[in-house]
């Protein structure tokens, strides 16, 4: 309950006293409504409070502030249409405060009237909160250019409060829109956000190159830290600058697949890349990945085979072939592909870990292949949480729970927010009936992951404890 509404209710009570002294129909009506709003206030029934305040505002046209109060309470009740009506009436009477206009913009946003929200906040010139809301709105709309301008205005208006979070965020947005202007923000935030250095390095390495290449390099860097929306924006700019740029189309097609509502069909972008050169290993590789995600593994293998012809020494091609063969049930053939990847790059623990993951997923030769592969991966890098979790999974599948827990815990020492480790520990503690630890680790999964499959599994497990 806001302070302004509390004041309104106190005034309403005073009105009640006055109405008891004057026996007129309006006074009786106001008295009754004042009692009702007090009861709704005590019961924390926001919807009823808002409706009564609207009724009072209609009955007492001189009490103009009631409209804004009604809108505020209706917003708290999530009755956004009523809130809109009340706030707009206050605006029509020229009594809507700046805080009320901010909230009216929020109402428009809630009901999907984005243009109205934008106009409302734009009317609050140099209002810091309005500028912040506009910046967030432009990001929702995908207008990165306007978002960058608004965040820069926010920093200008609030120079002393420019947090490291905002500098990093603005650096990422600017990297996608105008890479060469992003360095000033990224360099300031790198101490707290190491991933800022990944983006700034990509920008510096491409500063002397043509703009389309710079956007591709920046887009790849943004994709590497899972900033897929911004990566898509940068790569879209690249294909606009150079429609004949195969790599830009291929990487854009890949980025589009990671967006909830892509602005263009990913397959169309990938096929555009292939049309520029049907022998391109990159275009064939990305098309293979596309069909693999669709579950069309035979089609995927056709593209991976073409990629292999051009990239015979590229281990990732063999890994993806192994994944599709495994999905088709051809496990011995899949193992051969994983082993070929290892033979090409025997000093990279990633490929041993991927073989171990395959063995765990399909419960295939766990002791003969999975365990040695997981051990070698950890030997190459004992601070890689992926490798540590792979080792823990294999040990768990081999009924060595005690040592599996040690590796999951080691992964969390390296990275306390590593969701897969929390997930496995949550299951283990659940099986042990250690409910507090089970709930703790499962809640950590929801806090740290955006993997929809992992979220779904975790929520189903948590429902046992928190129905």
Image (spheres, grey):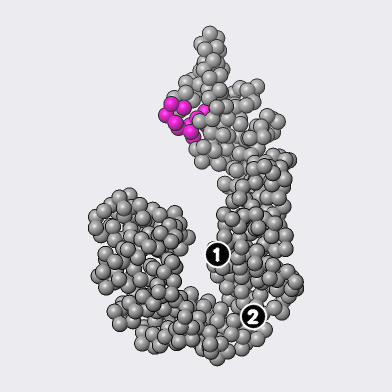
Distance from disc 1 to disc 2, alpha carbons, whole Å, reads 22 Å
Residue 302 locus on image (x, y percent): 51, 87
Question: Is residue 357 or residue 6 the one in the foreground?
Answer: 357
Q: Is residue 307 visible?
A: yes
Residue 359 locus on image (x, y percent): 35, 78
- The stretch of residues the image draws in magenta is 41-55
What residue occupies the far bottom of the structure in this picture?
Answer: 309
Question: Is residue 442 or residue 94 the one in the foreground?
Answer: 442
**Circle 1 crowding by C-alpha within 10 Å: few under 14, some 14–19, many from 20:** few
Vertical order, 457 against 249 (above or below):
above
From the viewer's perspective, tell me whether residue 111 is left or right of residue 439: right
From the viewer's perspective, tell me whether residue 430 is left or right of residue 268: left
Magenta-colored stretch includes residue 47 = yes
**Circle 2 crowding by C-alpha within 10 Å: few under 14, some 14–19, many from 20:** many
- Identify which residue is drawn at 61% across, 47% down: 163
Residue carrying label 1:
226
Q: Secondary structure at mark 2?
A: helix
What secondary structure do most residues of the magenta stretch adopt?
helix
Residue carrying label 2:
273
Residue 184 locus on image (x, y percent): 70, 56
Q: Nearer the viewer, mark 1 or mark 2?
A: 1
- Identify which residue is drawn at 39% across, 68% down: 388
Q: Secondary structure at mark 1?
A: loop
Q: Is residue 456 visible?
A: no
- Identify which residue is drawn at 56% across, 87% down: 311
Residue 333 locus on image (x, y percent): 39, 88
């Amino acid at each position: 309950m806001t302070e302004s509404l509390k004041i309104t209710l106190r005034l309403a009570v005073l009105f009640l006293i006055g109405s008891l002294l004057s026996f007129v129909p309006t006074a009786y009506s106001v008295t009754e409504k004042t009692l009702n709003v007090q009861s709704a206030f005590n019961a924390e029934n926001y919807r009823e409070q808002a409706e009564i305040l609207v009724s009072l505002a209609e009955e007492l046209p001189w009490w103009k502030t009631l409209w804004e109060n009604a809108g505020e309470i209706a917003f708290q009740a999530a009755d956004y249409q009523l809130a809109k009506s009340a706030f707009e009436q206050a605006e029509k009477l020229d009594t809507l405060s700046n805080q009320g206009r901010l909230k009216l913009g929020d109402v428009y946003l809630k009901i999907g009237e984005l243009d109205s929200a934008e106009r409302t906040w734009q009317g609050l010139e140099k209002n810091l909160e309005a500028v912040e809301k506009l910046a967030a709105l432009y990001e929702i709309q995908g207008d990165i250019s306007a978002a960058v301008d608004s965040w820069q205005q926010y920093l200008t208006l609030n120079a002393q409060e420019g947090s490291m979070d905002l500098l990093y965020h603005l650096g990422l947005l600017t990297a996608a829109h105008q890479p060469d202007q992003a360095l000033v923000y990224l360099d300031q935030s790198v101490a707290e956000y190491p991933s800022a250095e990944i983006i700034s390095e990509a920008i510096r390495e491409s500063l002397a190159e043509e703009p389309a290449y710079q956007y591709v390099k920046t887009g790849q860097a943004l994709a590497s830290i899972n900033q897929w929306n911004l990566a898509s924006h940068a790569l879209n700019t690249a294909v606009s600058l150079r429609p004949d740029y195969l790599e830009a189309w291929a990487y854009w097609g890949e980025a589009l697949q990671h967006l909830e509502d892509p602005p263009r069909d990913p397959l169309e972008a990938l096929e555009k890349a292939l049309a520029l050169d049907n022998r391109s290993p990159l275009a064939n590789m990305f098309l293979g990945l596309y069909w693999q995600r669709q579950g069309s593994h035979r089609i995927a293998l056709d593209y991976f085979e073409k990629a292999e012809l051009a990239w015979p020494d590229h281990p990732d091609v063999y890994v993806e072939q192994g994944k599709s063969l495994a999905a088709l049930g051809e496990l011995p053939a899949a193992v051969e592909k994983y082993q070929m990847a290892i033979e090409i790059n025997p000093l990279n623990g990633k490929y041993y870990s991927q073989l171990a993951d395959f063995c765990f997923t399909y419960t295939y030769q766990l002791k003969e292949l999975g365990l040695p592969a997981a051990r070698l991966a950890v030997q190459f890098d004992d601070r890689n949480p992926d490798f540590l979790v792979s080792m823990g999974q294999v040990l768990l599948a081999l009924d060595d729970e005690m040592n599996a827990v040690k590796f999951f815990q080691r992964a969390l020492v390296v990275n306390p927010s590593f969701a897969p480790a929390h997930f496995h520990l949550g299951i283990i503690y659940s099986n042990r009936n250690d409910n507090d630890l089970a709930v703790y680790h499962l809640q950590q999964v929801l806090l740290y992951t955006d993997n929809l499959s992992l979220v779904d599994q975790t929520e189903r497990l948590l429902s046992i404890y928190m129905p």
